[in-house]
């Protein structure tokens, strides 16, 4: 199966290892991975801030870059949502572009979702035996795309224990520009979310499919000296397959 | 009412810094409301109910002119006097006229957000009329001269210690009085109010066009008393609160109660069918319904924002909102706060007055998931943000930055260049900088650390 990896700009710059892990994992599962060269960012920063004209420019660019792909896979829930849900929204009034966006929407998947739903794989290996993991659900993946069980299934089937976390499904407070427009509120949200974790001594690491959430949460965790490692889901899934 | 919505970012930061107990009280109460809502939704086929309620409301809003006229005729047939208030001035004048004609000296009020919107209390007090809030939460914040901070729980931002202190100062209750004791003291005071009042003012959860029925939901019994004990009852009702038929009420009443407090039905539901009839032992002599527009028809005429008017004011979106939870409602600077406030306030007041509100959200989507009438709140927040941009209300620096961003992201060479530049920056630059955005980031968060090599670089170098 031929898969185009859309790395997303945050992963490209801050979690390059997530991209590497995603490629290795997909190859391990029998896929041929391509990396369409012209790709940049999905356009979400502009879209969420209300700059739809600019978001359309970036989206048009991405539509062109990914036009020929059979499947597009992203190691990010919120960028997947951008491509799958918000691109068609953006082009509601331009029939040709809308058709293009719909076509992209149909073939775009978040990594864990792709592995479970398209590849039909729910057992990657036993590489996570005995690991205790806190899983942060990114809001877009969870509520816009309904991705909830897929990552958990893969982690559990690899031997990990997902720790009980009352606020696992609560927003971490990142929200793109929100985190810098209303930094006090954003940090307070992160604190509230982190305060409902079991003691960090009972957790090996926190993982999430979303780069933005991870930057925000890990930045806060480090700042407060909580000593909890944060790892991209793609890297953890690759470890699962070992 | 006074609008301070433009102060949202400063106010939110201030509340977090100076009043940490607000966050604690609001978080505790909203989490409790929210989990009760989930349980109550789980008992019914919530998705079907929500879709049905959405379509009934859409139908009403699409035919609002017709239903308003039908409601007026039905109400009048029941002996209710109907008034139309185009704006807040109109509404105040109408209420003042009714009060004057009825020689009203004392008013009891049942909880109504629309009367806050219209600033009815200051107007009445200006006329020398004594106004008593009879909802326990409203009564407490009236004593403190504060506006409500939540649609359903107006005093949600206060904790028990603060209320104890207040009652101790005002009514000499023991400093450690139990909640039951405090409630009993308030009940005693309010009871006298009901008996002496000439006029009762309420809002309205629903008005049924077919039968002219005014429906009110509550838990304390004060609404029932406020609307039945005094000689005159005035109900202030937003024009969007209509339901077509009496049979629609059953599900809407239950849906509202489940969404608001997780109850199957409010403890008291009043279905008011007009003033006291000859031979009836009690009930008001006059019942007035004031249909309030005050900006609603312009929201209705707005092809992108009209869905906002499906709102039942259940506050489920506030309870589900992690942003609201941090500060409570006062920071929003207007009577409607939280997610619904962030989309309704710009519609009612215009974006100039309210521009920070659509940004007061991380777009997590919990509000939409909670809303019993499926108002697409995140989508509407984005719509208002887009309008702010189009109307040139967004910060100039931000607009320029986004333009630059779009340019870079449509030119792969520019993206590469930016990626290289990011790695050439001295470590300090991303940590301890004067660049405003990065500064806002690093205050409270560890500095950004780019991967030593971007993924793209690794791919191109054949390392993947
Ligand atoms: S927007 Fe929906 S959830 Fe919020 S108050 Fe209105 S009806 Fe309730």
Image (tube, coloured by chain):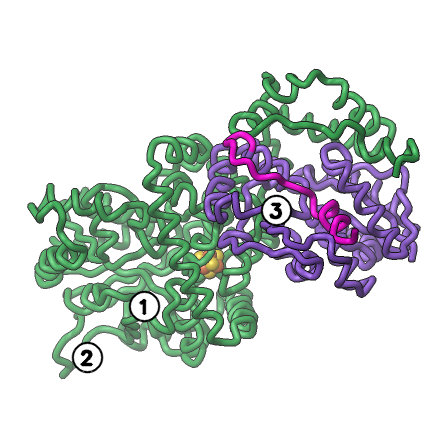
Chain colours: A purple, B green
Give the residues in magenta.
Answer: A222-242
Q: Residue at x 52, y 36 (%)?
A: A226
Gap in angstroms between the C-alphas marked 3 and 2: 50 Å
Judge whether B259 appears above or below B393 on screen.
Answer: below
Residue toward you, A190 or B379: A190
Whether label 1 touches label 3, CB < 8 Å: no
Q: Is residue B52 magenta?
A: no
Q: Nearer the viewer, mark 2 or mark 1?
A: 1
Q: Position of residue B402 (x, y in %)?
A: 70, 30
Quadrant of the image containing the N terminus of chain B: top left
Q: Chain of mark 3?
A: B
- Characterize the local packing of mark 2: few (<14), some (14-19) or many (20 or more) Cα atoms within 10 angstroms: few
- Tag of residue B216: 1
Q: Residue at x 32, y 50 (%)?
A: B156
In the rendered view, does A213 fall on the left or right side of B156? right
Residue toward you, A68 or B175: B175
Comes first in the chain, label 1 or label 3? 1
Judge whether B29 appears above or below B457 on screen.
Answer: below
- Tag of residue B383: 3
Mark 2 close to ligand 1, CB under 8 Å: no
Q: Which residue is mark 2?
A: B277
Quadrant of the image containing the C terminus of chain B: top right
Is residue B170 visible to us here? Answer: yes
Q: Could you tell me which secondary element the residue under label 3 belongs to?
A: helix
Q: Chain of mark 2?
A: B
- Characterize the local packing of mark 3: few (<14), some (14-19) or many (20 or more) Cα atoms within 10 angstroms: some
């Amino acid at each position: 199966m031929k898969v185009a990896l859309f790395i997303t700009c945050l992963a490209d710059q801050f979690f390059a290892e997530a991209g590497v892990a995603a490629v290795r994992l997909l190859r391990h599962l029998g896929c041929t991975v391509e990396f369409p060269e012209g790709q940049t960012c999905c356009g979400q920063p502009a879209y969420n801030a209300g700059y739809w004209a600019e978001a359309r420019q970036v989206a048009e660019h991405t539509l062109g870059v990914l036009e020929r792909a059979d499947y597009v896979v992203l190691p990010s829930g919120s960028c997947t949502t951008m491509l799958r849900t918000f691109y068609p929204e953006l082009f509601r009034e331009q029939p040709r572009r809308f058709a293009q966006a719909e076509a992209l929407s149909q073939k775009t998947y978040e990594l864990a979702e792709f592995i479970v739903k398209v590849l039909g794989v729910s057992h990657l290996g036993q590489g996570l035996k005995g690991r205790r993991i806190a899983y942060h659900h990114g809001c877009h993946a969870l509520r816009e795309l309904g991705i909830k069980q897929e990552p958990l299934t893969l982690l559990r089937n690899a031997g990990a224990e997902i720790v009980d976390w009352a606020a696992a499904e609560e927003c971490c407070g990142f929200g793109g520009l929100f985190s810098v427009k209303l930094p006090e509120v954003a940090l307070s949200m992160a604190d509230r979310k982190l305060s409902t974790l079991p003691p960090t001594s009972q957790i090996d690491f926190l993982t999430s499919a979303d780069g933005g959430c991870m930057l925000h949460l890990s930045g806060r965790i480090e700042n407060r000296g909580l000593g909890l490692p944060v790892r991209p889901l793609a890297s953890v899934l690759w470890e699962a397959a070992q | 009412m006074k609008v301070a919505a433009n102060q949202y970012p400063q106010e939110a930061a201030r509340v977090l810094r100076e009043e940490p107990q607000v966050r604690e009280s609001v978080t505790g109460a909203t989490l409790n409301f929210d989990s009760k809502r989930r349980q109550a939704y789980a008992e019914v086929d919530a998705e079907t109910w929500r879709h049905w309620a959405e379509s009934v409301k859409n139908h009403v809003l699409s035919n609002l002119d017709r239903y308003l006229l039908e409601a007026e005729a039905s109400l009048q047939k029941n002996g209710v006097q109907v008034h139309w208030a185009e704006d807040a001035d109109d509404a105040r004048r109408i209420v003042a006229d009714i009060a004057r004609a009825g020689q009203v000296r004392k008013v009891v009020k049942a909880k109504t957000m629309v009367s806050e919107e219209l600033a009815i209390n200051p107007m009445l007090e200006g006329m020398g009329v004594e106004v008593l809030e009879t909802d326990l939460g409203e009564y407490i914040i009236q004593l403190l001269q504060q506006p409500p901070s939540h649609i359903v729980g107006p005093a949600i931002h206060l904790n028990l210690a603060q209320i104890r202190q207040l009652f101790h100062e005002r009514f000499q209750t023991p400093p450690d009085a139990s909640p039951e004791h405090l409630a009993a003291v308030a009940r005693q005071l309010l009871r006298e109010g009901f008996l002496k009042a000439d006029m009762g003012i309420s809002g309205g959860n629903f008005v049924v066009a077919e039968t002219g029925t005014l429906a009110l939901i509550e838990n304390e019994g004060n609404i029932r008393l406020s609307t039945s004990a005094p000689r005159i009852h005035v109900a202030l009702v937003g024009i969007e609160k209509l339901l077509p038929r009496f049979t629609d009420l059953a599900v809407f009443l239950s849906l509202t109660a489940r969404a608001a407090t997780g109850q199957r039905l409010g403890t008291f539901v009043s279905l008011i069918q007009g003033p006291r009839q000859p031979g009836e032992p009690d009930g008001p002599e006059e019942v007035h319904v004031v249909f309030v527009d005050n900006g609603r028809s312009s929201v209705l005429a707005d092809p992108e924002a009209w869905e906002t008017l499906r709102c039942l004011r259940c506050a489920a979106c506030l309870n589900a909102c992690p942003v609201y939870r941090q500060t409570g409602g006062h920071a929003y600077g207007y009577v409607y706060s939280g997610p619904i406030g962030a989309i309704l306030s710009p519609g009612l007041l215009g974006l100039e007055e309210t521009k920070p509100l659509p940004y007061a959200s991380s777009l997590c989507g919990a509000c939409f998931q909670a809303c019993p009438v499926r108002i697409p709140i995140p989508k509407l927040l984005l719509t208002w943000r887009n309008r702010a941009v189009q109307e040139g209300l967004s910060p100039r620096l931000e607009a320029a930055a986004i333009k630059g961003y779009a340019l870079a992201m449509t030119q792969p060479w520019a993206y590469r260049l930016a990626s290289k530049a990011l790695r050439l920056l001295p470590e300090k630059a991303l940590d301890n900088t004067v660049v405003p955005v990065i500064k806002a980031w690093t205050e409270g968060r560890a500095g950004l650390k780019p991967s030593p090599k971007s993924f793209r670089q690794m791919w191109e170098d054949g390392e993947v």
